[in-house]
Image (spheres, rainbow, N blue to C red):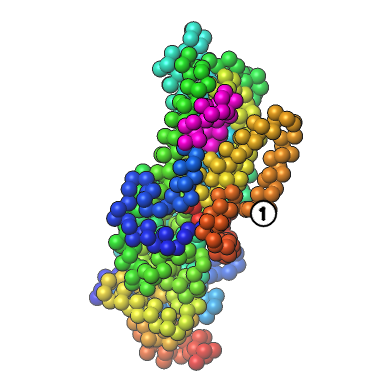
Amino acid sequence: MKREILKVTGLNKSFGGLHATRDLDFVLSEGDLDAIIGPNGAGKSTLFNLLTGYYRPDSGTILFNEEDITGRLPHEITRLGISRAFQVSNIFSKLTIFDNVRSSVQAQMGMAFSLFRSADGLGNEQTEEILTLCGLLEKRGNIAGALSQGDKKKLELAIALAGKPTLLLLDEPTAGMSLEETQDTMALVDNLNRERNITILFTEHDLSVVFNHARKIALLHSGQIMVQGTPDQVRMNETAQKIYFGEHY
Amino acid sequence: MPNTTREVAATKATAKYNWFGARSGRAGLSAPVLAVLTPLALLAPWVGGEFLTVVGVEILVLGLFAVSFNLIYGYMGQISFGQAAFFGLGAYATALVCRACQATGEIGYLQFFFALFLAIPVSALGALVVGFFLVRLTGIYFAILSLAFGELLFYIVFSWYGFTGGDDGIQGILSPPFFRDPVNYYYFTLGVVAAALLVLWRITQSPFGYTLRMLRDNQRRAAFVGIDVRRAMLVNFVIAGIFAGIAGSLWAPFQRSVSPSLLGWVQSGAPVFMTLIGGADYFTGPLVGSVIYTALNAYVTRYTVFWPLTIGSIILVIVLFFPGGILSLIDERISGKSRSVQDFSKSEAPESITDGAIK
């Protein structure tokens, strides 16, 4: 039995009358590469927002490495080793690609409040390594806001990696990417999981990506996990077919 | 608008970066601007006589004030309409100590330096208290609350006759004999402002400087790379307040008087105008703005009482036709680039107020 890196128990979150997350229990083991799927409005983004501290849960607990992180602030959770890449790229649009990543690396190094050191000498190697991994090294001098949609998504992932995460949450990492970019990105995701032992949880609408890359899949519906298991188990599950695959397959 | 090849060269040459980052090319247009301004500043009293010496002190002091404002506007992406409160607190701190020392005869040099120095803790404390509330807000709410706090501090100084002299202000502040000579005071101011600008430049090139740029571009994401956003905003607000306070402290003995209007919203408007004229995207933009604004003010008010009309027309032209300020106009001419990239990045960044990247 592998160690539990993330353990969510009885998580609830409502927005007015909408019960977006409902008594949700979820466990992620160290080294997992798992996916969360579900129809629009199932609560995938809400779950990510709860895990990373952007929303405060109404009730329930979130344990990360056996530490209670329920109700902590996003920057505190990030510093503990949970990084997040957003569905709609969420970058620093007036900085260069290089500065986007290096400033994030410096924040990870705890240098965000360093007033009198030169930023130019800090974290360059790690930045270059991340840019190489994400295939952005040659465009390092480009202004982030002027990039193509695909490159923005790559930068999105690069910024998340700058946090040296042990748990990486990817919200639709290939949305808006070409077929080739999708393959490159998912190859990178596999590589990060295998070679660097980063536990990864991702959401994705493209089911071929999900079934080719995820080792376990959880199906979220109306804020609850309806089915959880290996790709084959989920594919064969009747409930899953009824509420989700029916409209897709 | 950073030049791509230059940025690539800059990052490749990181092994050779020097203390001020000048060799790495990050100074951008600010390097030639300083190369032009520095000899002018050094020679001004010799060339321009007493009139230019007096105007020169104003340019330097208000320039430092405007650069401190731009730390909040150009770097952090928030606009403060109450920055004069800290300028005024610095000026009053110095003036009050000077008055106390003068009560027992002529002020000594040590006492005078202490009076100047006291502006730092006083303005820092003021900015800490105001900032505690301000950093909870962004955008228009930040701007309006900064205005409200500025007016609040103005009103306290305005009404507290027993301590601040109320609307009479404090008159007859005399510096020690050496500093009464305008040329001496000019060079003293030049030295202090130059030192302050070096520290400010250093801060803008530090990891914290880049933290500010991240806050400007995308506050939400900054939190998700591990930055305590409110704390970063507060630290920056206090730094900006301190340097505004230093500028104010230099102002008091030079004018030999202080009045509550130093804290008011008209005074808060000056750095906003200067920054818009010069260019918020450049470290030296507010300095260039101060040269233009202050020199114009000095000459125009000699001939006409319509100064607000004059500066209003200039601002109108700048905002309508060169929204990036004068330096951005020059930068585009040199690099031969259109503003298309800048406009694009502007449309991509709804959370931010400024456009273009800080050099």
| Residue in the picture at 61% in, 29% down | B262
- Above or below: residue B245 compared with residue B110: below
Instruction: Residue B59: say if magenta.
Output: yes
Tell me the kind of residue under disc 1: Phe
- Above or below: residue A182 compared with residue B228: below
Whether residue A167 is visible, yes or no, is: no
- Above or below: residue B38 compared with residue B142: above
Q: Position of residue B249 (x, y in %)?
A: 51, 27
Bin the neighbour count of mark 1 within 10 Å (Cα to Cα): few under 14, some 14-19, many 20 and up.
few
Whether residue B268 is visible, yes or no, is: yes
Helix, strand or loop for the magenta stretch, by majority:
helix
Instruction: Residue B179: say if magenta.
Output: no
Mark 1 falls within which chain? Answer: B
Q: Which residue is mark 1?
A: B321
In the image: residue B61, left or right of residue A1: right
Residue A98 quadrant? bottom left
| Foreground residue among A10 and B44 | B44
Looking at the rendered structure, the secondary structure element under dot 1 is: helix
| Residue in the picture at 49% in, 45% down | B33
| Foreground residue among B263 and B173 | B173
Q: Position of residue A203 (x, y in %)?
A: 44, 76
| Foreground residue among B103 and B256 | B256
Q: Which residues are magenta?
A: B39-64
| Residue in the picture at 42% in, 34% down | B195
Residue A207 quadrant? bottom left
Q: Position of residue B223 (x, y in %)?
A: 45, 57
Q: Position of residue A170 (x, y in %)?
A: 42, 72
In the image: residue B15, left or right of residue B188: left
Report the number of numbered marks: 1
| Residue in the picture at 49% in, 7% down | B105
